[in-house]
Image (cartoon, rainbow, N blue to C red):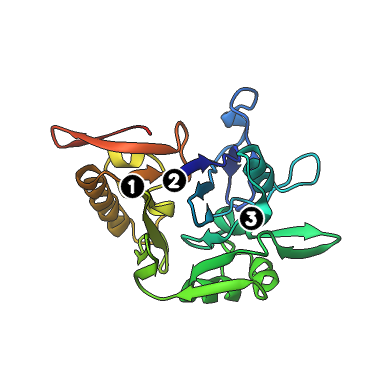
Amino acid sequence: MEIFALGEGSYSVDATKKFIPFNPEVDNPKDRPASLFIHVNPFLIKTSQDLIVLDTGLGFKDTRDELLIHQNIRNAGFDPEDVSLVLMSHLHYDHSGGLVVERNGKLEPSFPQARHVIQRKEWETGLAGKTSSYHKEIFGALSGANITFVEGSGELQPGIKYEHSGGHCPYHQVFWIDIEGRKVLFGGDELPEPEQLIRKFIAKYDMDGRKAMQLREEYGKKAVEEGWTCLFYHAKSFAIGNVLQDDGHFKVVPA
């Protein structure tokens, strides 16, 4: 198994829910008051059977009018058309924007050959478009794609399990991938940064902050005891890490 972080950079987000590129080397956070600063890291996993994308980023393009996630996949040495599985933790815009690409004024699936794995009720929530966290047009454009709707928790295929967690949003899910002698946990927005294992706190951006905090504790303990490598979607420093424990406290080191 090979794992790649497909970093899409840093962004500021204010009350308008717009994601504005932020370069900490030249941009001053004081110029963007009342903003949350986040980092976006979709992931790519290569196994002997599949080329897997875990969440798809914002769907922004580079200066050549190509999706950043497509270019990052090519930079890793693969062809986006060969992606066979797209595993979605949830469908908030910063995770689902890259599900589609605009070509000739029309949105179409970014990974037309892939099977997309989505919690059914999360899809229904996104398609309803009742909050600005979801962009309804994405799901309309994706409706003709190969989608496997799952409910609750279960095994997708040998070595890949999905778990309905419901801390960050009601139908959030996490993925446990145990293939070719390596164990990988993708916690989506319930385990978005290494720092959230190190510091125990309730996050305001989680639907159920207390549950999400408790889930992080459970994920950390399991990672330590069973040797799971964690993928951190919103990591500031390193996006792929191993969890250690010292005197009851978690420590995360680059994998």
Q: Please indicate whether residue 227 sits to the left or right of residue 156 in the image.
A: left
Q: Is residue 13 above or below residue 134?
A: above
Q: Give the residue type at disc 3.
A: Asp
Image x and y of residue 34, in percent: 54, 41
Disc 3 secondary structure class: helix
Tell me which label, 1 or 2, sits earlier in the chain. 2
Q: Which numbered marker is on residue 181?
A: 1
Q: Quarter holding the C terminus?
A: top left
Amino acid marked by disc 1:
Gly
Element under label 1?
loop
Please name the residue that numbered disc 3 is placed on.
82
Q: CA distance from mark 3 to mark 2?
A: 16 Å
The percent position of residue 184, horizontal first and vertical second, equals 37, 48
Extreme right residue here? 104
How many residues crowd around disc 2 within 10 Å: few (fewer than 14), some, or many (20 or more)?
some
Q: In the rendered structure, are the residues bearing label 1 and label 2 in contact, judged by CB atoms less than 8 Å apart?
A: yes
Q: Nearer the viewer, residue 141 or 71?
A: 71
Q: Which residue is mark 2?
A: 1
In percent of width and height, residue 162 lies at 38, 64
Around disc 3, counting alpha carbons within 10 Å, would you say few (fewer than 14), some (14 to 19), or many (20 or more)? Answer: some
Q: Quadrant of the N terminus?
A: top left
Return the residue nearer the eye: 242 or 246: 242
Label 2 is placed on what type of residue? Met
Residue at image x 23%, y 49%? 222
Precedes in sequence: disc 3 or disc 1: 3
Residue at 74% over, 65% down:
108
Residue 189 vs residue 249: left or right? Answer: right
Give SS at disc 2.
loop
